[in-house]
Image (spheres, rainbow, N blue to C red):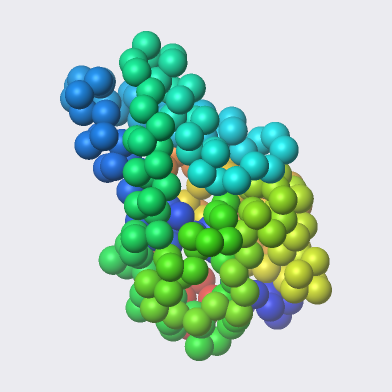
Amino acid sequence: MAPSIRYVSFDCYGTLTNFRVGDVTRVRLADRVAADRMAAFLEDFSAYRLDEVLGAWKPYPEVLHRSLERSCRRWGVAFDPADAQAIVDAVPTWGPHADVPAPLARVAAELPLVILSNASNDQIQSNVDKLGAPFHAVLTAEQAQAYKPRFRAFEHMFDSLGCGPEHFMHVSSSLRYDLMSAHDLRIGRRVFVDRGHGPGNPAYGYQEIADLGGLPGLLGL
């Protein structure tokens, strides 16, 4: 383990918490999007969520509402705000991927853990409480007034903890939201958890693990 690493920071939704937005969307829109086309619809919904967070900060429920509305418009299907609200309401109920609690607790015994999440303040703690490990800090897009992949979100983490990017190992299952920015900001170590959320690219200088069970080994634990 590099001696300069003081914190292990994590993306939360998708990396630690099983982000089940697709499951809820499939159920809610089953009457409007054919089953054999739902995967393509969900890809568009994911793309619009990324697009929605690239501008000025707005509350996360608005991100979900606007991105679902835009997806429905693209597909020519009726948008019902109740569908977006159902996703908003479901987020705090989701727990971790099965591979998360044990290795997370092991790492927490050696280094302070930090969450940097594209979350609102009122939803995140319920998910964190289900992870089964103590966190030194839980930082949100609402606090930063910026969403990842914007640098401002990461800079909020550096400023909040009083140290530089070289002092972090950042762990994420998303290249586009986290690891591209982590590379550009020269975060000390970057770890890609390959959960199938999008293609990797080794040019961004990360270490890759199949699930969180591989993390303690990267830290020499």
Residue 191 visible in this rendered orientation of the protein: no
Considering the image in quadrants, where does the N terminus appear? bottom right
Residue positioned 44% across, 39% down in the render: 198
Residue positioned 22% across, 37% down in the render: 27
Say which of 106 and 69 sits in front. Answer: 69
- Point out residue 25 in the picture as x, y percentages from the top left corner: 31, 36
Say which of 82 and 192 sits in front. Answer: 82
Residue at the top extreme of this rendering: 76
Say which of 211 and 37 sits in front. Answer: 37
Say which of 23 and 188 sits in front. Answer: 23
Q: Quadrant of residue 210?
A: bottom left
- Point out residue 67 in the picture as x, y percentages from the top left corner: 49, 30
- Point out residue 43 in the picture as x, y percentages from the top left corner: 39, 29
In the picture provided, is 193 more to the left or to the right than 176? Answer: left
Residue 168 visible in this rendered orientation of the protein: yes
Residue at the bottom extreme of this rendering: 109
Q: Give the vertical position of 115 relative to 208 (above or below).
A: below
Residue positioned 32% across, 40% down in the render: 22
Q: Give the vertical position of 200 relative to 156 (above or below).
A: above
- Point out residue 23 in the picture as x, y percentages from the top left corner: 27, 42
Residue positioned 42% across, 74% down in the render: 129
**Numbered label tally:** 0
Q: Give the vertical position of 192 relative to 114 (above or below).
A: above
Q: Quadrant of residue 168?
A: bottom right
In the picture provided, is 164 more to the left or to the right than 219? Answer: right
